[in-house]
Structures are given as structure tokens and as C-alpha cells.
Image (tube, rainbow, N blue to C red):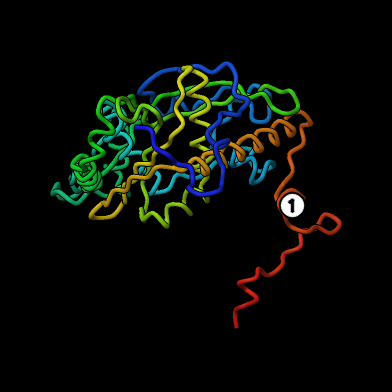
Amino acid sequence: MTTNLLPQGDADWSDLLKIQHRIRSAKVVGVEMLPQTYINTTGRRGSPDYVMSRSELLQVVACPHRWVAGWKKKETDAMEYGSLLDTLILTPGQFESRYAVCPETYPDTKTGKPKPWNRNATFCDEWEAKQGDKTCIKVKELEEAQAAVKVFSDHPILSGYLAGSQRQVMCIGEYEAANGLMIPVKCLIDIVPVGDYSDGLGDLKTATDASPKKWATTVWNYGYHVQAALELDIYNTATNEIRNEFRHVIQESEFPYEPGIRLMSAEFVAKGREHYMKALDFYAECVAKNEWPGYDREDQGFRMFNGWTLIEPEMWMLMKS
């Protein structure tokens, strides 16, 4: 399903659709990969052999010193819900091996009568400990996620979009940085469609607000355009295919779980490619020099005086009475 994403009129942005990147030696590792397999990375942070993902690359750009010291983003309720929804929609066959559904009640130690499940209770804590690496969820959490999946499955476009697609496709490759270093990179692609949508890739996201105007800001703030460009470039290099479109499938996390279907413009993908290449070149310089600056550095766009970052009011602040 080829779509003309270029603007009408005098503007000529045809170069946006040309693949101009430095991804090398890429390959597909597997399909329906477990998230933990993707997350596990050999090597030490800051070493040339460390395999970089999009999320870690953005963390490096934000604060190299914090990242190389081992900082990790804490798991939030929203992230846990997103992982559950990913499993139920993309890889339902993995549910039983990855999740354990807690009983609704547990026996009171004194009376033996059933009480509502409470993770602070010793019985509940010990039960969950026996589940090993599985994520323990309550019945209500599962029911809410299943209700969201039904809304998703009943959508007239989404059901066809996912039909026959490959899910959770892991790819690895190398990026040839401006300084000559070869940086290992990886991605885990949610959806590799077939048929009418075989000209692109897709990603499943959860959000509190899936409205189009809000989503453009979300894409920019969370670097989803960077993810789109990197996944397209690694996948195309690995398969010798020419996929140039990227779609987001969005599910709101609150009832009635309104879905959203978005096609990213060529301009947005091109900007994402520009950002990831600049970020990887910056990272390669940090690796080569073994220098990991903190937040206060000149490339952040702030004025600096003798190493101190000047914080000034923005224009909208000055307009406030």
C-alpha cells in the first residue's frame, strides 16, 4: 500500500525517501523473540563491542556520564501494562511462560478464611516468589488488558494489518560512525506486515492520549521517529527489502481503550534518521576518547560560562504576567 507522503506544491522533499545511512552487516536474529533475550547484552557499557539500542542511545545523548555509570529507567505501571498488552496482542503464545495470575484470595493464617489477595501478606509474597521469573498480575489487571485486546481485535483495519505479520523480530547490525568506529546496534520490531502493508514496519504503543495532535508531540518527545528510522534501516539492510513506511498502532490504557492508527510522514522518518546518526556519531566519539560528559556541555544549546550552564527564562515565561 504505497502512499504519497510528500507535500504538495513547490516544496521538493523527494530526497527524504532516499535511504542514506551507514548501517552495515545487518541480519535478522529471530522472530517472536522474548524481551529478555533482546534486553540481555554482552559487553560493558562504554566498550566498543557494547550493542546499542534506540532507548540506550537516547539515554547517552541525554547524559553520557549517567548512562555509562549504569543508570537504568525504572519500570513503571504504564510500562508493565504496555508489556502485558504487547504479549497478549503480539505473542499470545508466550503469556503462560511470562506471566502468573495471582489467586483472588488467600487463606487467613488465624481463621483460615479467604481474604482478598494482598502482596504485603506473607502467604502472597511467598506464592509470588515461587513463580520465579514470571511477572505476577492480578485477575483484574488481566481482565482489563483482555478488554483492551478485544477492542483492538474488533477494529476493522487493525485486524487485517496484523494478519499474517511477523511479530517481535530482532535484528542486529553495525553502524559505521564518522570517526571510523563500527558500533553494534540492535532493534526489536513489533510488527513486520505482509500483503498490502509490506512496504513498511509497525510498532504497538500504549498511551493515555492517542489523539493525532498529541501523538506528534509524543513521537518527538520519546524519540519514536528515531526508532522508526533505525528499525527501517537495520531491517532493510538485513533483508535487502525496501520498506520506507512506518506505522504506529496505539491503544489507550484507560476504558474504553480507544485505538489509534498513525502513518509517520517521510519528513518525520528522515528527521529520525538524522537524529540517530548524529547520536551514534556522538556516542562513537565518547567511546573512542573514553570521555563521558554530564548534563552540562556545550552541545545542549545552552550558553555556558566557565563550565556553568546559564538557565534563562523562555519567551513564554517572559510573557506571563
Number of residue marks = 1
Q: Quadrant of residue 88?
A: top left
Provide residue 310's location: percent of width, then percent of height: 76, 62
Residue type at numbered disc 1? Asp
Q: Quadrant of residue 123?
A: top left
Q: Quadrant of the C terminus?
A: bottom right
Relative depth, front residue between 26 and 109: 26
Q: Say few, some or many: other residues with alpha carbon within 10 Å of mark 1 (under 14 / 14 to 19 / 20 or more).
A: some
At a point 68% along the width and 70% down the height, the residue shown is 313
315 to the left or right of 251: right
Q: Quadrant of residue 287?
A: top right
245 to the left or right of 106: right
Q: Is residue 171 visible to us here?
A: yes
Residue picked out by circle 1: 296
164 to the left or right of 237: left
Q: Is residue 320 above or below residue 280?
A: below
